Amino acid sequence: MIAYPPEPWRIKMVEPIRATTRAYRERALRAAGWNPCLLRSEDVYVDLFTDSGTNAMSDRQWSALMRGDEAYAGARSFYVFEEAVRAHYGYPHVIPVHQGRGGENILSRCLIRPGTHVPGNMYFPSTRAHQELNGATFHDVIIDEAHDPVSEHPFKGNVDLDKLRAVLDACGPANIPYVSVAATVNMAGGQPISVANLTEVCELAHHHGIPVFLDTARAVENAWFVKQREPGWARRSVAEILLALCAPTDGAVMSAKKDSFANIGGWIALRDAELAEQARGLVLLFEGLHTYGGMAGRDMEAIAQGIAESVEESMIAARVAQLEYLGRRLRDAGVPVLRPIGGHCVCIDAAATLAHLPRDQFPGQTLAAAVYVDAGIRGVERGAVSAGRDPLTGRNRFPALELLRLAVPRRVYTRSHIDHVADSVIGVHDHRDAIARGLTFTHEPPHLRFFQARFAPVAGASIFAE
Ligand code: F0G
């Protein structure tokens, strides 16, 4: 028996979803260029495309929406939001943005000059895209274990300090505007960084006068893993650990669409008053006034309430247990699942599952297509399609991990949905030989190509054997 503790919530409102036939789904996916991202959500049964903005808000969050102060300037809701971020993340200067990538744009524009270098613990597509758009080169300094799908390392989000030192030596501290650290690391499968490692990274960077900025999108989940796995933290609350993770860093960029259960929103938070003033100036140009940053007052109220709920331990325990349950069901049935099971997703090693397909036929994208056609489950490729092309050489990047990510929205799906997902993925894995060929691009956008790309099977009309 795999543990599945009862959730600390009950369902007050439901949203109907629709099952379709296999023939219908194959037609829908072909019309969507074999890219599940281009499907209509009505045609999806269990949507595991992302845990971003797709979470169920609580009754308290919905009632907080009614308190939204929609004043253009100085809304009461901004001060409620500012106080929640300060109290739980510990940074003094809080600047709202419409979502995470809005904050990435602002921070990159403030700090990056062409020809500079940004080290980080694996990349996230939108984060790296903004760094590159502003002329920086990104350097992955995550530990090697993060690239190994079967390593059970408890902190696969850790930075390899030798790799960071090598970048410092090769590029020179003056050419490194900041170190970009994520907690957890999305592209590694939601893997955490330890407090000890993050503290060491900050010490090393600060020694060279370089600031460290944290991507806190899933830092609450990271704090949960610290409590479970890092010696010395078991008796501390998730809320305390969250503050401890942020404490050594110089600021953070947040997508409130993840941990904070909000459907939209984000923030930048900083310690340096001058940098904060510079960021506010750019927020005025790109996001909205510095007291709403592209959000409605009601969004800021929902986020403030969501932040308080996010550190409730029963909530986070139930979330992580649901993912662990899905991961273990797949693993026990022989599906090659990335280990350990992460904080927001279960990732299937698509390169191992579809070992008969070459990498340039995009096994991750192909597996995503097959899983959708089988039972209407939508995941997302996290491999070569997501990695895009090297801006200097123009060649496809082929990262070590070629994954199908099943990201589970918070408080949305029940155990029977999760069993449905497990049964389907196990079936697709058992009959993987029926997937005869992979995909090739028919339309390839220049940035974040995975969202809008269109594909066709490399031969014939379908990826399945006729
Ligand atoms: N950082 C991380 C670690 C993320 O996972 C995301 C978004 C962002 C930044 C950007 O935030 O979407 O609010 O602009 N991740 C989503 C995902 C899209 O599906 O993993 P955003």
Image (cartoon, rainbow, N blue to C red):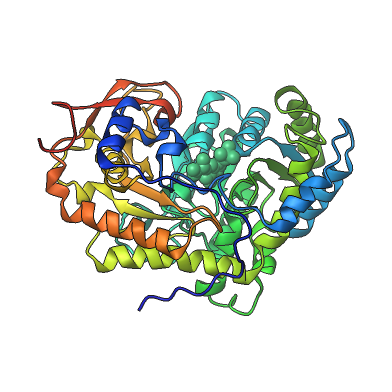
Q: Which quadrant of the rendered structure holds the N terminus?
A: bottom left
Q: Judge left or right: residue 395 versus residue 118.
A: left
Q: Quadrant of ligand 1?
A: top right
Residue 203 visible to the viewer: yes
* Residue 178 percent across, percent down from the top left: 60, 40
Give the residue furthest to the left: 466
In this view, the residue in front, 225 or 315, is 315
* Residue 29 percent across, percent down from the top left: 32, 32
Q: Residue at x 78, y 54 (%)?
A: 84
Q: Residue at x 40, y 46 (%)?
A: 45
Q: Which quadrant of the rendered structure holds the C terminus?
A: top left
In the rendered view, would you say 13 is above or below 334? above
In this view, the residue in front, 154 or 4, is 4
* Residue 262 percent across, percent down from the top left: 65, 47
Q: Judge left or right: residue 39 versus residue 461.
A: right
In the rendered view, would you say 85 is above or below 242? above
Q: Residue at x 74, y 57 (%)?
A: 60
Quadrant of res 201: bottom right
In this view, the residue in front, 282 or 441, is 441
Q: Residue at x 42, y 66 (%)?
A: 324
* Residue 12 percent across, percent down from the top left: 63, 59
In the rendered view, would you say 220 is above or below 271? below
